[in-house]
Every structure is written in C-alpha cells, then in structure tokens.
C-alpha cells in the first residue's frame, strides 16, 4: 500500500482527506520533467508567457464557486466569500 498523509482542517482539526506521498523515484521523475519544461518555457517570449498565464488565471477565477470554498475553507481556514474577494483583488493585480 502507498504511504499517505492526512489532510487536517485548520477550522476544527478533523481529517478531511488523505493523499498519497510520492516516492523518491516519483519526485526525481517530476524534477526531470520540470527541468525539461523549464527549457521549453525559456524559449517562449515574455508576451506569450503573460498571455498563457492570463488564460490560466481566467480559468481559475472562472471556477471560483467550485474551487475556492474547498481551498479557502479547508486549507486556509478562510470563508469562501473572503477568499473570493482576495482572489478577485489578486487577479486584477496580475
């Protein structure tokens, strides 16, 4: 069985999920892929990077109602409405 880590709510201390822990080989493979991607990313112009990241941000902000309650409530102990306001402010600043 794969080793797991328990994810604990900062709100009430309950365990709300378990996630697998990566092995050393899995981490090394991920680092190798990241290094290869870094080279490809360096070949892209700053303007193209900004456009890509803008699309990524738009996709995230477009899913606020789906994503933020989970992330904000469970991992940061913040209510969803406060997280939406913060995400909206941060998104405009990028």
Image: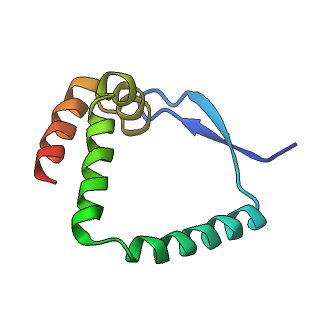
Q: Position of residue 11 (x, y in %)?
A: 41, 29
Q: Quadrant of the C terminus?
A: bottom left
| Quarter of the image where the N terminus is located | top right
Q: Residue at x 61, y 68 (%)?
A: 33
81 lies left or right of 38 = left
Image spot of residue 75 (x, y percent):
43, 38
Taking depth in this image into account, of 35 and 66 the one nearest to the observer is 35
Which quadrant would residue 63 be assigned to in this image? top left
91 or 37, which lies in front? 37
- Left or right, residue 17 beside residue 2: left
User: Residue at the location (33% across, 37% down)?
Assistant: 60
- Relative height, residue 88 to residue 23 (above, below): above
Q: Is residue 22 left or right of residue 82?
A: right
User: Could you say where residue 73 lies in the image, as x and y percent from the top left?
Assistant: 37, 29
Q: Quadrant of residue 48?
A: bottom left
Q: How is the image coloured?
A: rainbow
Up the image or down, 94 lies above or below 81; here it is below
Q: Position of residue 58 (x, y in %)?
A: 26, 39
Query: For residue 45, what is the image quadrant?
Result: bottom left
């Amino acid at each position: 069985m794969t080793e797991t880590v328990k994810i604990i709510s900062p709100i009430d201390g309950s365990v709300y999920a378990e996630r697998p822990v990566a092995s050393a080989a899995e981490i090394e493979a991920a680092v190798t892929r990241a290094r290869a991607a870094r080279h490809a990313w360096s070949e892209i112009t700053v303007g193209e990077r900004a456009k890509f990241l803008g699309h990524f941000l738009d996709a995230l902000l477009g899913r606020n109602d789906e994503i933020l309650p989970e992330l904000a409530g469970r991992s940061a102990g913040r209510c969803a409405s406060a997280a939406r306001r913060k995400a909206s402010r941060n998104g405009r600043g990028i």
